[in-house]
Structure formats: C-alpha cells, structure tokens
Amino acid sequence: MQRADTILVNGVICTVDPSFRFVQALAVGDDKILYCGNNRQALQLQGDGTKIIDLEGKLVLPGTFDAHIHAAYAGLSLSPDFVKVEPEDASNLKELNDRIREKAGNLPADTWIIGWGFKIRQVEEWAREERMPTWKDIEEGSLGHPVILNDGGLHTMLVSKQALKLAGITKDTRFKKEEGIMFRFEDGSPTGLFTDFGTQAAVGRAAYHLQGREMDECLIRMQRKMNSYGITSHNDIVGPGGNDICFGTYGEEAIRGYERLRREGKLTARVFINLLAGKGGVQSYDTIIGGLEEMNLPEFDDRKWVRADAVKIFGDDGWERDLPPEKNGYCMFPGETQEEQGEELRRTIRELHHRGWQTAIHLTGGRGIDISVDALSEAEEEEPGRDLRHFILHASSSSKENIKKCVRHEIGCGAQAVGGYEFGGETDYKVLLDGGMLVAEGSDAPALPMNWMKGLHFLVSRRAKDGKVYHPEMAIDIREAVRMYTIYPAYQNHAEDICGSLEVGKCADLQVLDRNIFEIPADEIEHTEVLMTMCGGRVVYRKGDSI
C-alpha cells in the first residue's frame, strides 16, 4: 500500500466529481490523489514522513483552470520596469506623461519602454476633443525613448516618435487590410496609433525581445501570481505569429521557456498552449497554415505539464450580421468583399480541422460566429469522430441555431465572466449553458483581472463592481459556476483525466479558501481569498500561516 506524502483532514472538500461530492479528507502521494473520503480512512495511509494538514473546516476546491489568459505578457506586465497606464493611473495627458517619464528617466538612452492599459475614451483630452491619440501626446514623457503602449484590450497600440523611427515606419509605409490600420496625420505621416497584430509586429520587430532566463523569470512571476488566486492550470496564447509582439511574450520563446521550466521542475501551474500561428501577426489561410508548417515546437516530454494542441485564430472584431460595412465591425481575414473574407475564414477553419488541430476562434460579432460555426460544423460532418473540441472565444452574439450546432458537434465557448463584473452588461452564458453548450471560464488577463472570484461572484449574483445587478434572470447556480472554472475548462483542453476535479488518480491540484462559498450570501463571494494552493501535490502558494 502506497503511503501518502500529505494528508488533508477536517475539511469541507468539494470534489467537483460527477456527483459533486463533499468529503472530509484527501490523501496525496507523489503528485496524485490517493484517496478522497473520511478522516479515518485517509489517516490509514499515513507513513513516517507524511505531513498532516488540519484544514479546520475550511473549504477545498480543485485548482482553478484559467481557460483564456495571456500569461507570458501578463508576466511582463508584472515587471517593475513595466508602465501601467490604466485609467486609474493616467486619466489625463499630464498623468500619462508622468507615468512614462518615471520609467524613462531611470533608463539608458534608446532603452525600449512598454506599458499597457490606456482607454481612449477615458483619457480626458482625447475624450473631450473627440480625437485619437498620437505620438505627440506622449513625447514629453518619453524623453526620446522608444515607447510602446497597448490599450486595455491589447488590440490597439500607441508608440512614440522614436519607436516609429527605429521601426522605419514613415508616411510611405503601407499595410494590407488584414495587417491592421496605421492612423495618419493629414500629411500622411504616422500618428503612432495602430490596430491589430500585423501592425504591432511591424513595430515590434525593431524592439527588444525577451530571451532565455529573462523569459523564464517572466513566466515564473506570472505563475506565482496565478497561484495566489488558486490557479493551477491555464492556457496561453503564444506562437510563431507573436514573435515580434510585446517584446516576444506572444512568441515561440515563451513556449521554449515553459518547457525549460518544466524540465527544471520549476512550473507551478500546468500550461495548455493555444498557438498564435499567423506569421507576422496576420490572420489568413497562408500565414496560419504556413506558420504551423514552419514552427519548431519542443518535444513536450511530460504532457501533464506542457502541451500545444490548439491553434488560436482571430476571426473578427464585432462583425455583426445585418449592419452596413460603414457601421459594422470587421473580419480580420483578407478579402476585397465581406463574402471573400468569410470564405477565407471558413477555408482556414476547415483546413485546421482536417490537419487535426483543435481550433480556438476569437469571435465577438454575430456574422463571424455564424460563418465559423457553420465551417466547424461542416468540417465535423465531413471528418467526424476526431474529438477535437473546438471552441469559440467570447461568443457574445450566438444565435439559437448556433447553439444547436455547437452542441451537436461539441463546440464549446471560452467565456470571461469577470468582464461582466468589471463592466456590467448582459452576457448570455446561462443561455449557452441551458442550450447544452460547454462554457469554460477564463480571465483574459491582463485585459481583465485574473482573480476568478470576481467572475464567480458575477455569475452567481449578477452584481458588478459598480454595485448594480444586471439581468438577475441570468444568474447561474454556484455549483455550475464552479464547474465553469474547473472541470469544464479541463475537458475543453482534453485534460479531464488530469485535473479539474478531486478524484483518485488525478493530479493533486487544489486550493483552500478562507470561507465556504456555498454557504455565504452570493454578494460576498468576491471577497473570498485563497489561503493555500497545491499543484501536483506541492504547496505552491500559502498566505501567511493561515493553514
């Protein structure tokens, strides 16, 4: 009989198994769960070196699985050299320049500065004057340094005059539609404002890139932060298409970094990579398929810790069903007409399915969702039984017909309930769940907070940060909401045999909370804190001496 390394007793342990059992004790051996049940039987597995943790009635949940997070970039945002310019940090141009100058003044000349978080309509001058930002707005603070600032959604970028110079971007520079937009002054010269990843990569090629141990430190920093919120598994969106985006934190070096840390036993959370494949940040059939063909992935010797089975593509930005082009969002794929763009998106999706890649598609508009769901459905019908588990990220305009097709072909949704907490609004996750879709929650950090308790709070109470209750009829049962952060994303990532629930034989990934979220009022869930996190049977986070 195998003796336990650690035994947790006297707890309220929520297994999230198919019957959603609550047990008293749990025994861990090596990195796996040996037993779930009562104290007496758990303690029978005690050996000479077994550590006993008395939970004193605390609630234990499976470790959280963040199904949508830009982890490497978020790790960069935690660096002391990173400039945060969120609205609370920089609500006007003086504050914005002060924040940049604070960093620029302590750095050698020509050192690149990167920051994140501005919102165009929340900077006083831009809102009042109803205009877009330009490099002139940050020239005073930059002190001649090349500066890159990403907006809060990560799709728009403002750069300094020196960054434009080093990148060789002038009035003669031209971008294809699918590469994104370069905003211009009346004389045609660049304003320093860009949208989408092709243009970001064009600037980023000239910038500094994290390599080797610098990248490793970035990843470790982020994993430890995630552990403090009970997160023990996560996606990351990195790959060849992101090599020149955000100092390389969207690129292949991040993948190599995860695998280096895995070999050294330094990972504190499991990594499921969604490959950003489109070369140069561009979304098209040729760039995505070509990027996959040309990339050189590590061997991933232990797939319990690191794997890369999915491809992330960006389908649209608010591309709705029945709006005229001038009032609509857009498809991110090339084509002279919307029909041509839709066909390029459809062709890419079908080819990815044919090649056996799970596909994660960023979609925020009804027309983009319609085209993509149709393409996924057609691919599944032509080549059924492949168990790829494709999923749509955001999926905020899904129709009843979309939902039926998704259920029929096991197409899931990657959701961000924390966005509801931050901004209120409708969010139709209950509609998706009631229709039979699998909904896996993630944070989209750093665009949104990675504290999953805020998302859970909104799902259950429908109360947002502003104190208002939005569409209470869409509240979700707390047990279902917990599944959305644990077993559902595990299943979405083909990892339900590894994590997502506390069952014998699975990896010992768990979190201990300071209160029982199943017993407290729904309005108090957001205040819940993690006392301890365990990943693979190892304590990776502990808050003080609470346990």
Image: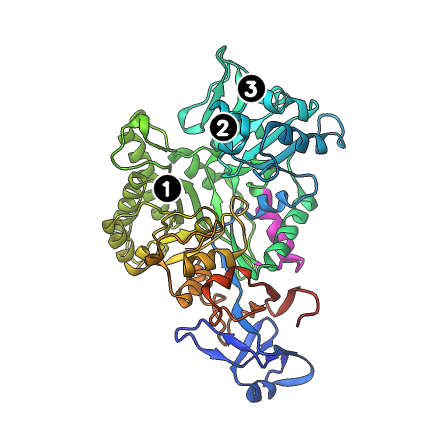
Which residue in the structure is indicated by mark 1? 364
Q: Amino acid at mark 3?
A: Ile
The span picked out in magenta is 253-269
515 relative to 11, above or below: above
Residue occupying the point 49% across, 17% down: 184
Q: How many marks?
A: 3
Given this view, does label 3 or label 2 mark the residue nearer the observer?
Answer: 2
Q: Which residue is mark 3?
A: 169
Q: Nearer the viewer, residue 309 or 59?
A: 59
Instruction: Name the amino acid, label 1.
Output: Thr
Q: Position of residue 131 (x, y in %)?
A: 48, 23
Whole-Å distance between the Cαs marked 1 and 2? 25 Å
Residue 130: x %, y % from top left? 46, 24
Q: Residue furthest top?
A: 187
Q: Secondary structure at mark 1?
A: loop
Q: Quadrant of residue 493?
A: bottom left
The reply to whether residue 410 is in sight is: no
Colour setup of the view:
rainbow
Distance between the alpha carbons at the discs numbered 1 and 3:
30 Å
Res 127 label: 2
Q: Where on the picture, by quarter, is residue 245?
A: top right
Q: Quadrant of the N terminus?
A: bottom right
Of the residues tagged 1 and 2, which is closer to the observer? 2
